Amino acid sequence: MRFAFGEYTKADWVYATARVYEKFLSGKEVTPREINTLVNSIGTLWLQWGDKISFATIAYYAIHQDQIEDGILQMVQAPPQGIEAYDPEWQQGIAAIHYGANPSDALQILIEPRLVKVISENDTTVFAELAKIRGFSSVFQTILERYSSSGAAMVPDFIMSAAALFAQQDLPSAPWVTAAWRTMRAKLTLIDDW
């Protein structure tokens, strides 16, 4: 790696990459060719992303690229394999690389599973944090529509929790806010289990 990155190499890059790669390999043998291929892949991603994404996350993406391409959501929701010690925002970086989006925009894909959990647990603090993320409006509306139209467990408690959490937010007067309220009212009128 020092040869490939030359004067740009930082001491923690080599260490972080080695630790993440060792966890990935978990005893499997690796050839020099595979190491060269990995370093080239990391280099290409680093040239593309630079300081927008941590080097450890870039290395993690290169190491786990096949699994990420097979299922990005499963990978960012799976227990981290050593990356969290080097980059607590690793999921955002992985999503940004995968979708070719700004890291701040990539958070949208991570919102839905967390938002469903937060609504189910009636967690005001995390709901408020998620509500500030770009893309929250469409994800929130999608959750309301999907969970009720698919016959999933859209119980009154879920809708009531969503409405209570939503009401506590300082949201602008916008068409999406009106649409979300309309959807929640409509879903509540359809629920028989009171």
Image (spheres, rainbow, N blue to C red):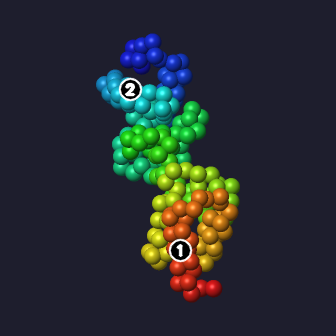
Between residues 97 and 73, which one lies in front from this camera angle? Answer: 97
State the image coordinates of residue 51 (x, y, percent, origin top left): 48, 28
* Residue kind at label 1, given as amino acid type: Arg
Is 39 on the left-hand or right-hand side of 167?
Answer: left
Between residues 107 and 121, which one lies in front from this camera angle? Answer: 107
Q: Which of marks 1 and 2 is in front?
A: 1
The label shown at residue 47 is 2
* Residue kind at label 2, given as amino acid type: Leu
Residue found 36% across the figure and 49% down from its top: 70
On the rendered image, what quadrant is the N terminus found in? top left
Residue found 68% across the figure and 59% down from its top: 124
Q: Neighbour class for label 2 at 10 Å: few (<14), some, many (≥20)?
A: few
Is residue 54 something that shows in the picture?
Answer: yes
State the image coordinates of residue 78 (x, y, percent, origin top left): 51, 49
State the image coordinates of residue 118 (x, y, percent, origin top left): 62, 60
State the image coordinates of residue 65 (x, y, percent, origin top left): 38, 40
Between residues 95 and 19, which one lies in front from this camera angle? Answer: 95
Do labels 1 and 2 touch, CB within 8 Å?
Answer: no
Is 159 on the left-hand or right-hand side of 139?
Answer: right
Above or below, 6 against 74 in this view is: above
The label shown at residue 140 is none
Is residue 38 something that shows in the picture?
Answer: no
Q: What separation in Å lies between label 1 and label 2 (alpha carbons)?
A: 46 Å
SS state under label 1? helix
Q: Mark 1 points at which residue?
A: 182
Is 123 on the left-hand or right-hand side of 72?
Answer: right
Q: Quadrant of residue 89?
A: top right
